[in-house]
Every structure is written in structure tokens, then in C-alpha cells.
Image (cartoon, grey):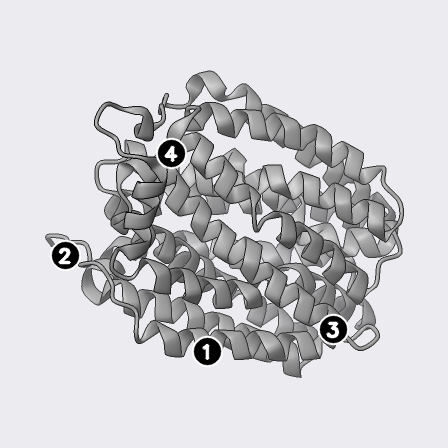
């Protein structure tokens, strides 16, 4: 889990500044590049999930995807021009992003009590996401923007390390191939008819539309605010790392909060945090305000992204467990990202990102209203004190 998220933490938080300095990207270019990845992710997560449930062991699939992602990233770094870079980035994300959902499915298959056990396990992912920011921050503080290409080699090495971990992952063969398992499409239809499943996908679609804008454009906005205030860009990493470190105590609290409050209130806390974060980025250019708002990534990730993953897992049967997690990614990272990033590319005015964050506010507000109508499965039993 630590290395799984370190691969993302060494690359995505610095992608906007990297493309701006190394490839000459502007706000609209970055939105279009991320939009291309979102379109591909409207299809590929479902494909990988179906393969993991019916064809290949999920642990083997994860390692193969990391191996191919490593070399796709190197090819991406050598690209030039918006069209070529968009295609190469889509190729990379089609292999890298579903590994998070598949890793969740791998954990759920092998944990006895996911609502209680997954939070403390997943906090190692937050530690992993934060770790690469330390060497990258020192690199930037020492040499400046020209050294941002370092993130490519660091992330490449992390992907290779993950591929080599294959013998140490628990072997998890496709549950849908076991005797007595039903037809895949029949099981899928049952899943969509299950209580709350379709509505949770819709809520995730809207939340992730705003999250995609936050994910790709907030590092760019924060980086510009730092530079405009004569603060070195190298502080971008530590500021974002602080928010990720805050996830650690929240992950430890998550089982108790789920037991006491239930899924609806916990997910609502995560969406409310994202709404406040979007609003600050839409209305302020102060480095202090943006740095403080960046810390709200912690409840966004823990209470909503992980909370909804656990809620979906409680609905899905073992034979479609990987598919349910990748459908969540398809609705969010796929279709949700397409909505957010397409809107961002249309709303972007020159180098301004404010209109994009106002749109993200609207998505979060609407998702909060829809959350009130979701029929949730029974919450996990309250822990004994």
C-alpha cells in the first residue's frame, strides 16, 4: 500500500508545474490533457475489473499494470505537443489509475472486517503519497523548476518496485470463476439493482467532477500563488504533504466514525470539506489561504473517497468485488473527470482557474443534496469500548 500510493504521490502533485515549465502548458492545455485521460478511464477500469473477477488473479493483474505503466511514463516524458502528450498520458493513466481500485479489491478479498481493518491499512497509502514530496521538495529548493523532470525517474522506479512485489502479494484468484458463480452480466445486473449502488455511483460522479479540477488545477494555482509572492516553488511539496499527513489520524478514526455516524454522515463530511476547499480556491489567491485550504484534502480522501469505496464493497458480492470498485472508478475518475475537466477547459479564461473551481463548488453542493436520498446498507456494528 505504501509503494502503491508513493507512485502517484511522486508524480501527480507536480504534474501541472512540470508540464508548465517543461512543456509550456497553460491552464486549458492541462485541462484538455487530463480530459483525454478521463475519456479513456470511462472504459478501462471496467475492463480491468472484469478481468480480475473472471480471468486473472487480481494480484497478477496489478503487477502487470505497474510494469507497463512504468515504461508508458518514460514514453510520455519524451512526447511533445498537446495532442501527442494527451494520448501518451491517457495510455499511462489507463494502466496506473485502476491499480488503486484493484488494490482496494485485493484488500477487501483478504480482510475479515474491511470497515474496521481497511482504514488503518490504507493510512500507509497516505504515508506513501507523502514520502516522494520530501526529495522532490529539496530538489526544487536546491535547483529550481528545471529539475522537475526528476519526478519521471522517481515514479518509474516506484512502478518497477511494485511490479517486483508480485511474489509477496496474497494470491487472489478470480472469485467469479469458482464453482457456483453466476453469469458475469447477471451478477452485474444484480449489483446495479442492489440498494443504494446506482445512487452512490451518481454521487461519486459529481464529487469526482470537482475532485478532478482540484487534483489537476489546485497544484498549478497554489504554485503560481507561491511564485507571485516570491516564495520558492519547492514549498509546493511540503504544503501538499501536510494535508496528506493529516489523513493518518483520520484513517484511524474512520472505523469509529462509520460505526457511530453511518455511511451517509461520514460521506457528507467528506463532500462538505471538498466544497469549502473549492470555494477558497475560487475566491482567493493568497498563498496562506490556499495552503490552509489544501489541508482539506484529508477529509475529502478519507471520509468520501475511502468511505464510498467501503460502502460499495458492503453492497457487492465477492464474484463482482473488483468490478464494483472499478465501476466506482469509472463513474468518478472516468465520467466524473470528463465532466469536470471538459467544463474546466470551456470555462478557463486565459490563465485563470477561478471559474473552474466555482463549477466544482456546484458539483459538490449538488452531490450533497443527492446524498440525502441514497439508501445505504446497514452501517458496520459499533466497536466495543
Residue 353, picture quadrant: bottom right
- Residue under circle 1? 366
- Residue under circle 3? 346
Gap between marks 3 and 1 measured at Cα: 20 Å
Task: Give SS at disc 1.
Answer: helix
Q: Position of residue 220 (x, y in %)?
A: 73, 63
Q: Disc 3, disc 2: CB below 8 Å?
A: no
Gap between marks 1 and 4 measured at Cα: 32 Å
Gap between marks 2 and 4 measured at Cα: 25 Å
Gap between marks 4 and 3 measured at Cα: 38 Å
Tell me the residue at 46%/58% (across/down).
301
Mark 1 / mark 4, whichever is N-terminal? 4
Mark 4 / mark 3, whichever is N-terminal? 4
- Residue under circle 4? 106
Residue 231 visible within the image: yes
Gap between marks 3 and 2 measured at Cα: 47 Å
Gap between marks 1 and 2 measured at Cα: 30 Å
- Residue under circle 2? 382
Amino acid at each position: 500500500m505504501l509503494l502503491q500510493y508513493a507512485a502517484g504521490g511522486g508524480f501527480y502533485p507536480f504534474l501541472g508545474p512540470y508540464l508548465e515549465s517543461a512543456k509550456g502548458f497553460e491552464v486549458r492545455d492541462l485541462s484538455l490533457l487530463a480530459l483525454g485521460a478521463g475519456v479513456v478511464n470511462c472504459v478501462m477500469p471496467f475492463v480491468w475489473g472484469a478481468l480480475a473477477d473472471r480471468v486473472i488473479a487480481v494480484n497478477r493483474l496489478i503487477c502487470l499494470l505497474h510494469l507497463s505503466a512504468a515504461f508508458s511514463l518514460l514514453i510520455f516524458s519524451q512526447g511533445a505537443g498537446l495532442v501527442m502528450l494527451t494520448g501518451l498520458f491517457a495510455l499511462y493513466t489507463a494502466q496506473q489509475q485502476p491499480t488503486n481500485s484493484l488494490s482496494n479489491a485485493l484488500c477487501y478479498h483478504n480482510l475479515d472486517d474491511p470497515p474496521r481493518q481497511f482504514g488503518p491499512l490504507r493510512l500507509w497509502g497516505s504515508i506513501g503519497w507523502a514520502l516522494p514530496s520530501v526529495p522532490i521538495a529539496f530538489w526544487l529548493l536546491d535547483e529550481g523548476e528545471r529539475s522537475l523532470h526528476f519526478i519521471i525517474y522517481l515514479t518509474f522506479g516506484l512502478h518497477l518496485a511494485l511490479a517486483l512485489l508480485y511474489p509477496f502479494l496474497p494470491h487472489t484468484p478470480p472469485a467469479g470463476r469458482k464453482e457456483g458463480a453466476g453469469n458475469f452480466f447477471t451478477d452485474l445486473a444484480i449489483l446495479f439493482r442492489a440498494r443504494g449502488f446506482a445512487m452512490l455511483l451518481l454521487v461519486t460522479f459529481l464529487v469526482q467532477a470537482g475532485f478532478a479540477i482540484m487534483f489537476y488545477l489546485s497544484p498549478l494555482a497554489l504554485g503560481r500563488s507561491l511564485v507571485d509572492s516570491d516564495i520558492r516553488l519547492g514549498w509546493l511539496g511540503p504544503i501538499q504533504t501536510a494535508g496528506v499527513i493529516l489523513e493518518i489520524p483520520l484513517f484511524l478514526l474512520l472505523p469509529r466514525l462509520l460505526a457511530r455516524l453511518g455511511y451517509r454522515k461520514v460521506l457528507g463530511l467528506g463532500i462538505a470539506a471538498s466544497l469549502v476547499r473549492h470555494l477558497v480556491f475560487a475566491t482567493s489567491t493568497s498563498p496562506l489561504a490556499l495552503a490552509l485550504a489544501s489541508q482539506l484534502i484529508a477529509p475529502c480522501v478519507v471520509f468520501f473517497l475511502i468511505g464510498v469505496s467501503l460502502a460499495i464493497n458492503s453492497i457487492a458480492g465477492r464474484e463482482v468485488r473488483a468490478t464494483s470498485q472499478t465501476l466506482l472508478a469509472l463513474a468518478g475518475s472516468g465520467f466524473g473527470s470528463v465532466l469536470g475537466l471538459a467544463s474546466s477547459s470551456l470555462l478557463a479564461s486565459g490563465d485563470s482557474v477561478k471559474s473552474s473551481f466555482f463549477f466544482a463548488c456546484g458539483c459538490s453542493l449538488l452531490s450533497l443534496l443527492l446524498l440525502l436520498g441514497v439508501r445505504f446498507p446497514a452501517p458496520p456494528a459499533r466497536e466495543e469500548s
